[in-house]
Image: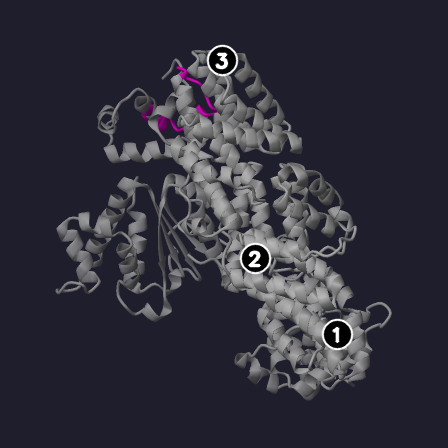
Amino acid sequence: MNATLPLVGRAAERARLQDLLTGGGAVVVRGAAGLGKTALLTQIANAAGEHRVVDVRGIAAEADLPYAALHLLWSALPAELARLHAHRREVLERAAGLRAGAAPERLPVCVAVVELLALAAEEQPVLCLIDDAQWLDEASASVLAAVARRLGPVPVALVFAERGERFADLPSLSLEPLGHAESRELLRSAPAAPLDDAVLDRVVAEARGNPRLLLDAVHPAAGLAGGYGVVPLSCPEIAGSSTTLTPESRLLLILASAEPLGEPVRLWQAATGLAIGPDAAEPLETAGLVSFGAWVTFREPRLRQCVYGLASGAERRLVHGALALATDSQLEPDRRAWHLAHATVEPAEAVADSLARLADEAGRRGGLPAAAAFLEHAALRTADPRLRAERAIAAADAHHAAGAVDAAVRLLAVAELGSPGVAARARSNRVRARMAFDSGRGGPAVGRLLTSAQDLEVCEPRLARPAYLEALGAAIFTGHVDIVHAVLARLATHRPTSSDRLLEGVAQRCTAGYAAAVEPLKLALKTLDNDHEDDARSRLLACLVAPDLWDDDTWHDLTRRELAGARETGARTILPYVLTHRALAEVHFGQFAVAESLVAEAESLTRLSGTPSFPHAACVLAAWRGHELPTFAESCFENGGMARTTARYATAVLRNGLTAYAEAADATRDVLDRDGIELQGWSLVELVEGAVRSGDLTAAAAAADRLSERACLSGTEWALGVDARSRALLRDGQAAEDLYTEAIDRLGRSRITPHLARARLLYGEWLRRRGRRVDARGPLRAAHEAFLAMRAEAFAARAMRELLATGERARRRVPETSSQLTPQERRIASLARDGRSNPEIATALSISPRTVEYHLHKVFTKLSITTRTELHLVLAVCADD
C-alpha cells in the first residue's frame, strides 16, 4: 500500500485500529479526500506484526465489473483458495468469470469468502485493508459488508476506507481535519524547504486541517522557496469563473495569489498602486475564491497556484511590480528583491546584484531552495557573460543540494553557454561530479570528484581542500581504495582548519594505521563544530570517524546536529546520507523504532529522487532485531567500502544472535587482514564471540588483541566495555568474572544499550555454565527485559533459553502481566503452560481448536512472547489457577 501522507496525531484513531488488530472485526475509516485515510491504513499495516496483510483497493475504472475487487482479495490467498472446498471454490470462480456457469447468488459467495478468510487465519491472523471503498463494484461491496458481519471469533480484521457512507451499517471511525498545532507539526516534519512563521500560518489557514493540501502547499513543486512565491499551476476547472470577473476583481485575485504572506496591509497598498478599490473584493468572496479579513486566504492552497497559473506573464509582472513598491526595502529587502525579479524579464544589473547579495538572507529564511531560487534569478538577469556563468553555477550547486536536479542541469547549461573561465569550469565540473555520485555512487563518479578537486587545486586552491575531503569521503564510503590513496597523494600544504585536521587524521588512518590517527582525529572532531566554513559533505566523513573512535557521545551529537541542519536548510540531496548515519547511531543506542522511521524516510527520499538507496542502516537494524537481512543486502557483499563491511557486520550480529557462531565468525574473519575506516572495529567484537563459541580460539585471540589495542587508544566507555566483554570470553575463573563485571559497569555508562544487554547475557551464560544458576538469573533477566524492550528478538530468545535452563519458573515479566489477560485467555494460557495441546484445551473448555489458537495468539501478543515455553516466565502462577 502506498502512503502519500505522513501520519501526525491521530492517536485515538490508531488506538482504535490497534484494538481491532487484537480482537478482530471490522471498521470503516471515513473522511474527505486528503485527510489521511490511506496513511492510517498504512500505519496499521506496519503495526500488524504477525498478521498477514491483504490489500484491496477500489478502482473507479472497475466499478462496473462484478466481483472485480473480491477477485483481488482471493487472488492474494492462492494456497487457501486451493484448500477451499471444491464447491466453494467453484462459486468464487463462477463469480469471477473464471468458470462457465450462471453467476452465483451473493450469499454463497459470502460464505465462500468467510471460509477462505478462516482458512487463511488458521496459519496466522489476517488483516484485510480495503482502500478507496467508494469505488468498489456493487457486488464486491455487498459481499464484503456481509462478510464483515459474519466473521465471528475468527482472527480476521477488515478495515475499509471510504469517502461517503456506502458502508454506513458497519462500525465507523471518522477522520476530522487536523488542529492548528497538528497542522504546523505536519508542515515542520515535511521534507520540504523551511517556511517562516507568517507563510506557515497562511498555509495552515488555507488548508483548513487537510494533510494533503498542507503538504501540496509546501511540496518542492509548489515553488514556495521559503515563502517567497508560487509556481504556475494550470486549473481549467476555474478558468470560467475567473473570466466572468471584472478586470479589477480579476487583477486583485492575481495580486492576492502572488503575495505569499496573505498580509492585507501590503495587499491593499499594492492594490491602490494598481488603482484597484475595495469593491473589487466582493465578487471574489461571493464566488468563494478568496476571503479578505485578518488574513487573505484562498479556499485552499492549490487554488492560489491555479489563479497564478491562469494569469498571463504580463499580469504577473504587473502585480509583482506593485508588490515590490509596497514592500519596505529596509525591513524586507529579500522579499522586495524577489518581487522585483518577477516584475522584469530582461537583464537588470541592479536587480541581479540585489538578488545575489540577498541569497544568503533568503537561505536563512527559506533554506537552500530559497537561496537557489535567488541565485537563479540573479543569473538570468545578469548581462555580463562571465558573471552570469558564475552565478548560474552557484545556483546549480544550491539547486542540486536542495534536490532540484533538473534545475541544476538547466543552470549548468546556462553557465556553459557563457564561455566560463577556467575556474568557473572547474567549479561546474565539481557540481556535475557531485550529481553523478549522488545518482549512482559508482567508481567513475568518485573518480570525477577526484578530478574536479585536482582541477580546483590549480585554479581555485581555496575550494580544493573541501573538494578533496569530499572525494575522500565518497571513496571511503564506496570502498575505492585506489582513489583514497590518489586523494592522499595530491594533498597540498595543510592549513589549520578543522576540515584539514580531519583530512590529516583520515590520511594517517589510511596510511599509518589506527594508532597514529587517533589523536589527530580526536582533535578534528573536537574542533569541527567551531569551523562554520566546513562543507556539509565533508562533515559526513566525521560521522564515520566518530564511531570508528568508539566515541558514542560525539557520534550522537554530530549525527543529531547534521540531521537537524539538513532538515532546517532543506538539503534534500544530502538528507538520505545523514538519515542513514543517524539511523545507525539509533540502532546502537537501542532505539530501534526511531531507527526504523529514519530508514523509511531515507528510502522514501531516494525513491522519490530516483537515486540508489542506502542499505547500511536497514541491514544493521534487521540483524539486531533477529530478522534475515533484506534481499538487497546480498549485493553489498559484492561491493566494497562501508556497504560491504556493514553487511558483513550485520550478518555476524544476526548469526551470533541465532547462535550460529561459526557463520558469524566466517562473515567477519577478513577483518583480520584489513584495517580500514569503514567501522571494522564493530566486526572485531562479533568475530571474537563467534570464533570463541565455534572453537576457533586462534582467530578469537587475534581479533581480541586488535580490539584491545583500539580500545586502549580510544579510551571511551564503549570501547573499553566491549573490549572487557570480549576478553572475558577468552578467560576463565575470577579473571573472566571480573572482566564481565567491568564490561557491564563501563557499558552502563555509555549510550550503547544493546551491547550492555549482550554483556549481561554473556555473563549470565557464563555463570549458568558453571553451575551458578541462581546467580545467573539476575543478569539474564536484565538482558531479556532489555532485549524485549528493544524488540531484539533473536537475542531475547537466546536469553529466554538460558533463563529456562537455570530452572526459573513462575516469574512475572511485569506486575500487571496477569491483568492484561481476559479470564478465558488466562484459562487457555494456564492449560497451555501445563503442556496441554490445542485439541485437549478445546475439549476441556468446550470450545473449538481454532478458538483456542485465536486466544493463544492474543495471549502471545499481549505478553510479548513467541513460544509456549515462555509462558512459564511471564504467566503468574496463583492459587486460583
Residue 218: percent from left, percent from top: 62, 64
Would you name the residue on which mark 3 appears? 775
Residue 849: percent from left, percent from top: 24, 32
Q: Residue at x 28, y 34 (%)?
A: 851
Q: Secondary structure at mark 1?
A: helix
Look at label 1 and name its amino acid.
Answer: Trp
Query: Dividing the picture into quarters, in which one does residue 336 lie?
Result: bottom right
Disc on res. 177 = 2
Compare marks 1 and 2 and give the one earlier in the sequence: 2
Judging depth in this view, the residue of 81 and 333 nearest the camera is 333
Q: Magenta span has 173? A: no
Judging depth in this view, the residue of 692 and 818 nearest the camera is 692
3D distance between C-alphas at marks 1 and 2 = 33 Å
Residue 525, compared with residue 832, is above or below; it is: below
Q: Secondary structure at mark 3?
A: helix
Which mark is in front, 3 or 2?
Answer: 3
Dot 1 alpha-carbon crowd within 10 angstroms: few under 14, some 14 to 19, many 20 or more:
many
Q: Magenta span has 818? A: yes
Would you name the residue on which mark 1 appears? 338
Judging depth in this view, the residue of 438 and 133 nearest the camera is 438
Judging depth in this view, the residue of 561 and 194 nearest the camera is 561
